[in-house]
Image (tube, rainbow, N blue to C red):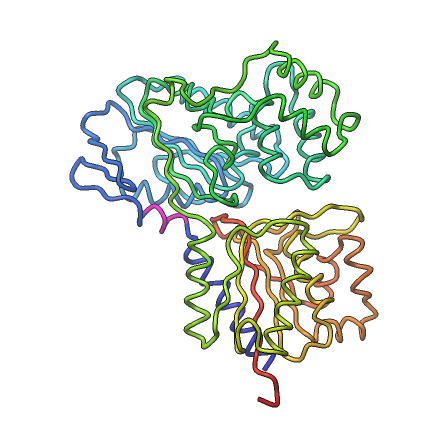
Amino acid sequence: MLDELRQDAHAIFRAALEAADPAKAVRRAARLDGTHLTIAGHAYDLSAFGHVIVLGAGKGTPAMASALEDLLGDRIAHGLIVTKYGHELPLRRIETLVAGHPVPDEKGVQAAQKVQALARDAGPNDLVIVLLSGGGSALLPAPAQKISLEEKQATTRALLRCGATIGELNTVRKHLSRLKGGQLGKIAAPAKVLTLIISDVIGDPLDVIASGPTVPDTSTFAQCLEIVGRYKLDRELPQAIVDHLRRGAAGELDETPKPGDPAFDAVTNVIIGNNALALEAAAAKAADLGYTVHALGSDVEGETREVAAQQARLAREVFERGQPVSPPACLLSGGETTVTITGSGKGGRNQEFVLAAAIELDGAEAIVVLSGGTDGTDGPTDAAGTIADVATLARAREALLDAPRFLDNNDAYTFFAALDDLLITGPTGTNVMDVHLFLAGKPATA
């Protein structure tokens, strides 16, 4: 039974990945009739524009750009996108640059400068199509004046290490940048700007995804200082960063552009893909395979191991008592949990999720848990996530692997690599956060 449950779990995850494909998202949203382009209900007569310029950043933008090239062809005058190393695709009219993620690097700085220059050169009769997906914030590092790349890198690492949410991380990023927090949109004005977005953030807040480069920003320097204080980073962050945020909060630096700024009168932002769409496809696949689906939502957040343990206990209730649904059942959720790093091991939030769940499920007869990042990379590893069942801990004990010790050391990658249970997909070309699923089969006596 476990082998069948594992195979089904992989099939359900693959269905989620297919639905999240950025190229398919563009094709679903866009239609071209002669010179009339319609995207998500917004109409543009391309004959009215001098140039169509494509800009973008994120792990999903190569696939988005490829679909846009197929649609518009030589109507694209020129373009430039930035993606993570290893995520590029061959394009015909749009240049691709690669850079570091999640910690920005010098390649990203150079790419951001080129994106900024192209946006600044756009004229009032031009259409700028911006493609954004997960990772866009790190891939467009344009440090604010008197801030160095190294100082931004140190700040990003500190915020990732302390367990800050993506919203908190991006609030700070916006105020250390020349492009984020609506600043790219303002630079491109008075050109007309259309931004197509694959969301990797819970609730799809436009001003948080990729740090909202074309969206008016509601966050402030004062909020940045609150975040720094909340995680007690005052002494850990570079002094230049703290001084910059304090000067901004004191009104000595310009804030990011806010709602009501006329620069955004010609800017349209459209969500064309998100975690909810991936979960819908996963649920449909699970139902086709004969499972009753119990959806837990696409907005799951919180400390990874706590969320995993809670969902694992629910899976036990399903298997042992038939509550809240009867097995065979699939518990399905998505979102982005947080790992507070206290150890020195290797892993990511999906691998930690499965390890914590496996410990909670130890002894369960027929439950499988799989968690994977839709981008194909979980933390600083080559795995999208991993899978486990009751036999996992039994095999671990035979190999003298102490699961709680590996969890305490944030070393789930090493644990699951030794058991050959890592989920290796390679770069998927998309990023709509994570997919978590538990499959509970029927008890042997049923």
* Figure check: 235 above or below 305: above
Residue 402's x, y, as percent? 82, 65
Image quadrant in which you'd find residue 403: bottom right
In magenta, the rendered stretch is 22-26
Residue 329's x, y, as percent? 52, 73
Please name the residue shown 50% across and 23% down the image: 179
Please say whether residue 23 is one of the residues in the magenta stretch.
yes
Residue 2's x, y, as percent? 61, 79
Please say whether residue 430 is one of the residues in the magenta stretch.
no
Please name the residue shown 21% across and 31% down the image: 46
Quarter in which the C terminus is drawn: bottom right
Taking the image as shown, residue 239 lies to the left or right of residue 316, namely right
Q: Nearer the viewer, residue 380 or 225?
A: 225
Q: Nearer the viewer, residue 27 or 167?
A: 167
* Figure check: 164 above or below 239: below
Q: Nearer the viewer, residue 197 or 337?
A: 337
